[in-house]
Amino acid sequence: MFYIIFILKIFLFYFLPIFSIFLKSSKNILSISNLIQVLWIIYAGFLSYIPFYYYYNQNEVNIQHLIPSYFLIIILFLFLILPFIYFILMKFIFSRARIYLKVIGIIFLIISSSFIFGIEIYNHSKRVVLENICYTNHNSSAEQLECCLKAEYIWNEGFSFLNETPSNCNKFMSWND
Amino acid sequence: MKYFYTILFFLFLPFFAFASDYKLEKVISNLNKPWGMSFIDDDNILVTQKSGNILKINLNTKSILKLEHNLAVTDPHWQAGMLDILYSDGYIYVSYTEDRGGEKTSTSIAKGELVDNKIINFNNIFQSEPPVENQLHWGSRLVIKDKLLYASVGERALGSVAQDPSNHIGKIIRIKTDGSSPEDNPFVNNPSWLPEVYQIGLRNPQGMALNSNDGGVYITNHGPKGGDFFGKVVAGSNYGWMDVAWGGVDYDGSIIGDGSAWKEGLLKPIYRWIPSIAVSNLIFYKGNQFPELKNNIVLTSLKAKKLIKLDFIDGKASNETVLIKGMGRFRDVEQNEIGQIFVIIDDDESGIWELKYN
């Protein structure tokens, strides 16, 4: 399932801007072409920011301790503002410049997507090992297995949650008793 | 009927006591990143600042006196700087990150005599070996029991080195107050072990306290992502870092070792926090001002920003209760002889605060 969603994400990430290249530019601001590009910008921004946020949050790594605080703004600029500028330029620049911009845009997409999807694959590879512990050690009932698979912390003798523990899972979390 | 109400009153008295809310009152403000404190008497306290300063503060008059010294404390970068302090019988002991040259540093301990607000003969009595090139995981808490100094040394982010007894990294060390090794240290006659080593297999023990009831020395230890714990210092024992991670995983999500929290032959933690709360220093409260805390543990947490009570009965910890939450990163907690409890918060609101009833 992870890989189906993953491939779908990559497909959308590349398909929409490439598709928009072949669409005829319309002067109508409410055209389908413009709508697709706006949706893509939102999607790209969402998709690119979330892995960073998710990765550092889930790993309890305080991003501000690793990088200067202004780097968060750079990340936002790279993954949200820049595509937006790209889109604006696309609409108002003459055809030859537009071709160069589209090439630059595609290169930018390849670079940014390698970060975005690289982190996602990396996280998934780490997660599979933990989930195997659930299938091996915490499968005495379907309920316990389900709790374990939802947990953020999994070890041979137990599991735990980062935030709210589902009420039905408390009974499986007695490592301090 | 009168007896009924009397019985009812005493039955519910403990609940009223526990229902009491606590608050913190600021005693000293604008301290720049304080780290450790130790009482000289009920009013005067010694405080370290990561920047390298040692301060003598009168909690009544609020006067702050900077005590001069010439220790080679590294710049206060990341977790480095002047760390814990302990006052005992006229002497000051400090743990600090020492510049050992060539960008290498170590957890070191210096001792000096406090005479007329001056520290005299302030020299190292211990340097952890080997010095290392990073700014992480120093441990550094100090406790004196039976005229022997117990100190925690972090594993300097070197992981399995904590299992190697030929270094001080990731260990509890036990030395005489002149720096020499006691003859009854567990491995003093084993040439492959450093004589100061008392316990091995720790990651970053940032809390240490003596329990005067059972005479035991207890620590808190930072696990990785999950696996913070409270446990006992036991001669010659091994907590297992980095073969086990006490329920935590590595920051990149990897399992540590085979994913076990504990293995045969290792010492078990008494109480664990998963997720981690970044557990810091602790006390076993022995005063009378807060009867419900007496003989129990009060401990601090950095990341979770909590002051926590743990019941401690027959060597077991339970019933975690949050006394204060959300005021900042609680670094240190200490008590004086009249039972007042003071904490260090080292956030923007850096300072010393006193615990009170609401």
Image (cartoon, rainbow, N blue to C red):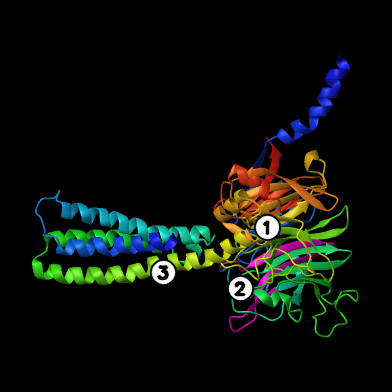
Q: Nearer the viewer, mark 1 or mark 2?
A: 1
- Give the quarter of the image for residue B164: bottom right
Residue A40 or residue B73, whichever sits in front: A40
- Residue under label 3: A118
| Left or right: A87, with B344 as reference point | left
**Amino acid on which the number 3 mark rests in the picture:** Gly
Q: Is residue A25 magenta?
A: no
Q: What is the distance, in whole Å, between disc 1 and disc 2 at their CAs? A: 22 Å
- Residue lying furthest top: B1
**Chain hosting mark 1:** B
**Amino acid on which the number 2 mark rests in the picture:** Thr
**Chain hosting mark 2:** B
For the point 80% across and 67% down, which residue is it? B150
**Amino acid on which the number 1 mark rests in the picture:** Ser
User: How many numbered markers are drawn?
Assistant: 3
* Rendering coords of residue B28 (x, y %): 64, 49
- Residue under label 1: B280
| Residue B72 visible in image | no
| Residue A48 visible in image | yes
In the rendered image, the quadrant that contains the C terminus of chain B is top right
For the point 81% across and 39% down, which residue is it? B291
Q: Are marks 1 and 3 in contact (CB under 8 Å)?
A: no
**Chain hosting mark 3:** A
Q: Judging from the image, what secondary structure is the residue with disc 2 in?
A: loop
Q: Are marks 1 and 2 in contact (CB under 8 Å)?
A: no
- Residue under label 2: B74
Q: What is the distance, in whole Å, between disc 1 and disc 3 at their CAs? A: 36 Å
* Rendering coords of residue B314 (x, y %): 86, 50
Q: Which residues are magenta?
A: B78-107
Q: Nearer the viewer, mark 3 or mark 2?
A: 3
- Give the quarter of the image for residue B134: bottom right
